[in-house]
Image (spheres, rainbow, N blue to C red):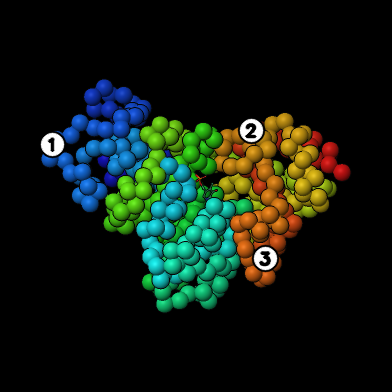
């Protein structure tokens, strides 16, 4: 496609890549094709084995024109050869594990990741005969120390949910190459506006499209991006067969969200910076973690690795559980809810004891690192696109009510 062969700027690609006016009607906006099946010629194969890039649309679990447009757009933004969209971020992440890992393989994974990723790697992968080592990936030396002859995959999340702790992608990518292991990065918090992990040495990038890429809290989706041949294997071997595919309607919504990704990320950063500065000066707030603050323990890495500090921050107060009850009741603009990356601001309290019990079974050293970012618990705050003054006032009002 013309837009992809020329080097257009990121914003232009966010709008045009993957799309083209409909040849039949001239429609400028992408068509929403909800058809599950497509009229084919009688020679069409019915096995995923025969699936290739030239395969026409046959059945939407195999491929769909609207989902295809989204995949091309995402590939362009992450500077990837190929992309597969999935029905959720977790469908994408587990598909990658199933593709890369087999019994006897060793996985090195960040000890803090999105909770479902942490739980899947802790509880499920070992049952398949996969050895799992969890390391604190804020220090690449921990990855080097954990490498073994059978290490097949290194998996990072940067910034990691919920700590907003970073991994040096360039450094870990180098270790992975030397060890002949594959390297995957969940870049949901960063988005391609901030960081392009493939350029820094990752083999795969993962996204929960539910968050910043969709951006409006109304469509769950996920994606894997990487090299053409690996992604073709994932498509044939996993995506078509396990079937966790993205609905065309969600693809259409997410594509519409991506058109404004750059300007939204600018505004998310602006909102988060204003809220972070406000909270850092608030007498009832003990600690604020935001990559854009000089006080973030990895601020230098954030400046190197992130072109945008994104909209995620955490803060700590003296009595988190009590404050959570007050915030849930008193906040008027900000929603007390999980998820993130939406145009609406969201806040949610994550007690350290709970997280360590349910998601992250950490050793003493890793627990110390966790606590150095989270204390006894954090409010994870996702700055939306409201006026930052209204966000600060909302928080100020609610914080005034905590004892
Ligand atoms: C939300 C999230 C996921 C999971 O995505 P779903 O779309 O909810 O399945 C994975 N990784 C990160 C970093 C997330 O924030």
Q: Residue at x 22, y 47 (%)?
A: 47
Q: Separation of disc 3 and disc 2 at Cα?
A: 35 Å
Residue 210 position within the rendered picture, expressed as x and y whole percent measured from the top left: 50, 41
Residue 308 position within the rendered picture, expressed as x and y whole percent measured from the top left: 55, 49
Label 1 element class: loop
User: Residue beneath label 3, please?
Assistant: 367
* 62 left or right of 361 in image: left
- Number of the label disc, if any, that sits on residue 386: 2
Label 2 element class: loop
Other-residue count near label 1 (Cα within 10 Å), few / some / many at <14 / 14–19 / ≥20: few
Q: Separation of disc 1 and disc 2 at Cα?
A: 54 Å
Picture quadrant where residue 59 is located:
top left
Other-residue count near label 3 (Cα within 10 Å), few / some / many at <14 / 14–19 / ≥20: some
Q: Are marks 1 and 3 in contact (CB under 8 Å)?
A: no
- Residue 137 in view (yes/no): no
| First along the sequence among labels 1 and 2 | 1
Quadrant in the picture for the N terminus: top left
* 357 left or right of 119 in image: right
- Number of the label disc, if any, that sits on residue 42: 1
Q: Residue at x 58, y 50 (%)?
A: 309
Q: Are marks 3 and 2 in contact (CB under 8 Å)?
A: no
Q: Residue at x 53, y 76 (%)?
A: 145
Residue 124 position within the rendered picture, expressed as x and y whole percent measured from the top left: 49, 59
Q: Nearer the viewer, mark 1 or mark 3?
A: 1
Q: Nearer the viewer, mark 3 or mark 2?
A: 3
Seen as rendered, the residue at the extreme right is 403
Q: Separation of disc 1 and disc 3 at Cα?
A: 60 Å
Residue 96 position within the rendered picture, expressed as x and y whole percent measured from the top left: 40, 56
């Amino acid at each position: 496609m013309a837009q992809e062969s020329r080097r257009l700027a990121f914003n232009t690609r966010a709008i045009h890549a993957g799309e083209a006016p409909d040849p039949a009607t001239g429609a400028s906006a992408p068509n929403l094709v909800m058809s599950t099946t497509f009229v084919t010629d009688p020679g069409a194969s019915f096995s995923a084995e025969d699936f290739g890039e030239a395969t026409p649309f046959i059945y939407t679990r195999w491929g769909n024109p609207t989902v295809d447009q989204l995949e091309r757009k995402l590939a362009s933004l992450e500077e990837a050869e190929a992309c597969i969209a999935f029905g959720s971020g977790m469908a994408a992440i587990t598909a990658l594990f199933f593709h890369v890992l087999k019994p006897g393989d060793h996985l090195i994974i960040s000890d803090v990741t999105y909770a479902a990723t942490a739980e899947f790697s802790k509880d499920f992968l070992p049952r398949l005969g996969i050895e799992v080592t969890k390391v604190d990936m804020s220090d690449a030396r921990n990855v080097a120390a954990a490498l073994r002859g059978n290490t097949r995959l290194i998996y990072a999340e940067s910034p990691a949910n919920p700590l907003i702790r970073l991994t040096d992608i360039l450094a870990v990518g180098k270790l992975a190459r030397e060890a002949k292991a594959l390297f995957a990065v969940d870049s949901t918090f960063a988005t391609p506006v901030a960081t392009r992990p493939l350029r820094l040495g990752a083999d795969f990038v993962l996204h929960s499209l539910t968050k910043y890429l969709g951006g409006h809290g109304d469509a769950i989706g996920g994606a894997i991006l990487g090299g053409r041949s690996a992604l073709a294997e994932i498509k044939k071997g996993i995506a078509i067969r396990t079937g966790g595919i993205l609905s065309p309607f969600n693809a259409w919504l997410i594509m519409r969200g991506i058109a404004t990704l750059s300007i939204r990320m600018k505004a998310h950063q602006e909102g988060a910076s204003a809220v972070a500065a406000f909270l850092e000066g608030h007498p009832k707030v003990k600690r604020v973690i935001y990559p854009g603050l000089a006080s973030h323990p990895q601020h230098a890495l954030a400046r190197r690795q992130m072109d945008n500090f994104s909209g995620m921050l955490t803060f700590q107060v003296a009595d988190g559980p009590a404050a959570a009850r007050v915030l849930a009741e008193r906040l008027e603009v900000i929603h007390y809810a999980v998820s993130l990356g939406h145009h609406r601001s969201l806040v949610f309290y994550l007690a350290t004891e709970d997280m360590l019990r349910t998601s992250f079974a950490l050793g003493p050293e890793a627990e110390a690192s966790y606590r150095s970012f989270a204390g006894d618990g954090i409010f994870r705050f996702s700055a939306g696109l409201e006026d930052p003054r209204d966000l600060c006032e909302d928080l100020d009002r609610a914080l005034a009510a905590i004892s």
